[in-house]
C-alpha cells in the first residue's frame, strides 16, 4: 500500500478482519489497525478497529462494504 487511509471503523477486530477478507477477495489490499496489542487485549480498544486501504482503492472498497451491508440488511429483514 502506498498511502493507506481508514475507510471504516469496527467495534471488534473480528468484524474488521471479516471486512478485510471481503475486500481482499475482490482484489483490494486491506489492513487492520487497532490499539489492542495485536489482539492480545481486545477489551482495550480505544477508538475501535480501523480498516485501511490504499487511497486509490478507497472508493471501490467503500462501495463494496456498503453493498455488503445492504445485502446483509435485506436478507435479515425476511425475519421469522
Image (spheres, rainbow, N blue to C red):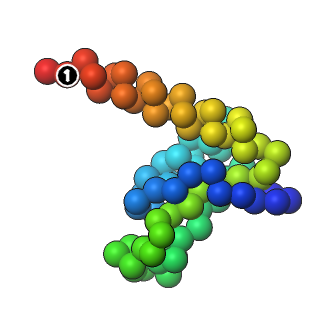
Q: Position of residue 76 (x, y in %)?
A: 29, 26
| Quadrant of the drawing holding the N terminus | bottom right
**What x and y, as percent, mark residue 29?**
72, 49
**Which residue does the image show at 47% across and 65% down from the upper left?**
48
Question: At which x and y percent is residue 6?
Answer: 65, 57
Q: Is residue 63 left or right of 76 when viewed as pictured? A: right
Residue matched to label 1: 79
Q: Is residue 53 above or below residue 32?
A: above
Q: Residue at x 43, y 53 (%)?
A: 15
Identify which residue is drawn at 45% across, 75% down. Answer: 46
List the single residue furthest toward the top: 78
Q: Which of the 4 quarters of the picture holds residue 70? A: top left
Indicate the secondary structure of the residue bearing disc 1: loop
Q: Residue furthest left?
A: 80
In the displayed orientation, state which residue is furthest to the right.
Answer: 2
On screen, residue 29 versus residue 75, left or right, reads right
Amino acid at each position: 500500500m502506498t498511502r493507506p487511509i481508514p475507510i471504516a471503523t469496527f467495534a471488534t477486530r473480528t468484524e474488521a478482519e471479516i471486512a478485510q477478507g471481503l475486500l481482499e477477495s475482490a482484489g483490494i489490499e486491506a489492513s487492520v489497525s487497532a490499539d489492542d496489542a495485536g489482539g492480545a487485549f481486545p477489551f482495550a480498544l480505544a477508538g475501535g478497529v480501523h480498516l485501511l486501504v490504499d487511497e486509490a482503492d478507497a472508493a471501490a472498497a467503500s462501495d463494496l462494504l456498503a453493498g455488503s451491508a445492504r445485502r446483509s440488511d435485506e436478507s435479515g429483514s425476511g425475519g421469522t
